[in-house]
Amino acid sequence: MPNRSTYQAAKIAAPAIAHHFAQLLAAAAAQGETDLAPEPPLSCIETMIDVAFWASLRKEESRSPKISLAYVPPLLAGQPLIFENRILVTPYVLTKLAPAVERSGIHLGVWDEDGELYIWGTTRLIPDCCFVLEVVEPGLLVVKHRRINGFGKFINVAVLKGDEIKIIDEESRTLPDCPDMLTSLLDYNTSPGWNSPVNILVQLAASMRAHGHGGSLLVVPAGSDAWRDSIIRPITYPVTPAFDELKRLMEQPVDEQTIDVWQEDVNRAVESIAGLTAVDGATIINDKLELLAFGAKIGLSSNGVPVEQMLVTEPIIGTEVTMIHPSQNGGTRHLSAAQFVFDQRDAIALVSSQDGRFTIFSWSPCENVVHAHYVDALLL
């Protein structure tokens, strides 16, 4: 396939992305996985990124396109909608087709034939580890792939925004202080299925980010009220008894006949709880996924010691570890989350900003300090 890229970031990012998918598919095959997606060639990756970028800058009826492209042949797509005639992939075509596929979960199927990339139709079902390129907004593209068995959020591989390139550093999952939630965001094979509490936290984080209001979610140990020492009383909206819909859904037996309805129920429950985080103050759940309160104000615990420093990392290749004062990290919401984790070291705090930035706060036993993990590139 001839290289006609004019978007320089496509040329720069494509080799690293191609290497990732080659390793990913080889590792999955070595583990005995079957029904895997085909490996995307370097030239196809570069061309898809280039065309999608220029399409993202166009408009159709005053609307910017939102598109998801999947590199897969029709034979490997479940229940595909196949066009009578294949269509050459161009920015114009992507812009024209975007309104038909902007709903979540619909992909334009792309395949290479005779040295050219063509759109063959649409699909909702794609094989494991399938290369997906999503146009999020003008100039913002995300390369991702489907998890093994298809459960949970797709794994992000790279984020391109204009000339800014972020290649996800999957080796971050091997760090000793890496929270389980971050590991799940980085590793396609970490969580066994949707009914993992860690996966539900990922879905909650994605929903919090999506509502755009900003918010805080505190996850505390079940069976302990120690967290109350760091919350100003009275709590604005306590929940008694604890709301346990998500917990009950996680305990519910699921089979092939009931899984679709069950996932819809989980999605609704996740959106309901994530919506509470838009209320001023923090939403509090325990690690059994029971809702305890929302609109809660975080204060100094009875020890009265303010947090003075914080470790900051981002799972992006080339970024450096920094140590800062928590007030340098953002506004009151971020500072109070850092203080909460400083006082309640067996808890974690998830904080979403209105601008889309997302941070996981956890305690680092190795460094004996609050650790802020920037993960917005993993949640797009």
Image: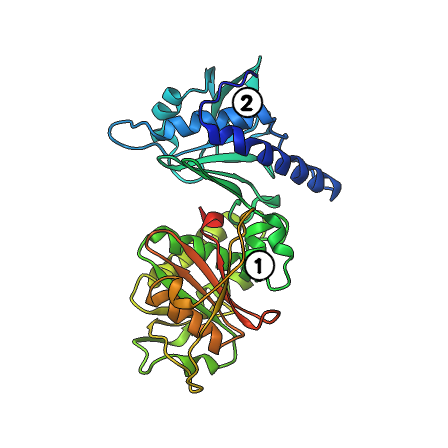
| Local SS, label 2 | strand
Q: Left or right: 50 with respect to 254?
A: left
- For the question of whether residue 1 can be seen, the reply is yes
- The residue drawn where x is 49% and y is 26% is 48
Q: Left or right: 326 with respect to 184?
A: left
- The residue drawn where x is 36% and y is 20% is 92
* Residue type marked 2: Trp
* Residue type marked 1: Pro
How many numbered callouts?
Answer: 2
Q: Left or right: 234 with respect to 146?
A: left
Neighbour tally class for label 1: few under 14, some 14-19, many 20 plus, Cα within 10 Å: few
- The residue drawn where x is 56% and y is 28% is 72
In the image, 145 versus 303, the foreground residue is 303
Q: Residue 15: image x %, image y %? A: 59, 32
Dot 2 or dot 1, earlier in sequence: 2
| Residue located beneath label 2 in the image | 111
| Residue located beneath label 1 in the image | 253
| Local SS, label 1 | loop
In the image, 356 versus 102, the foreground residue is 356
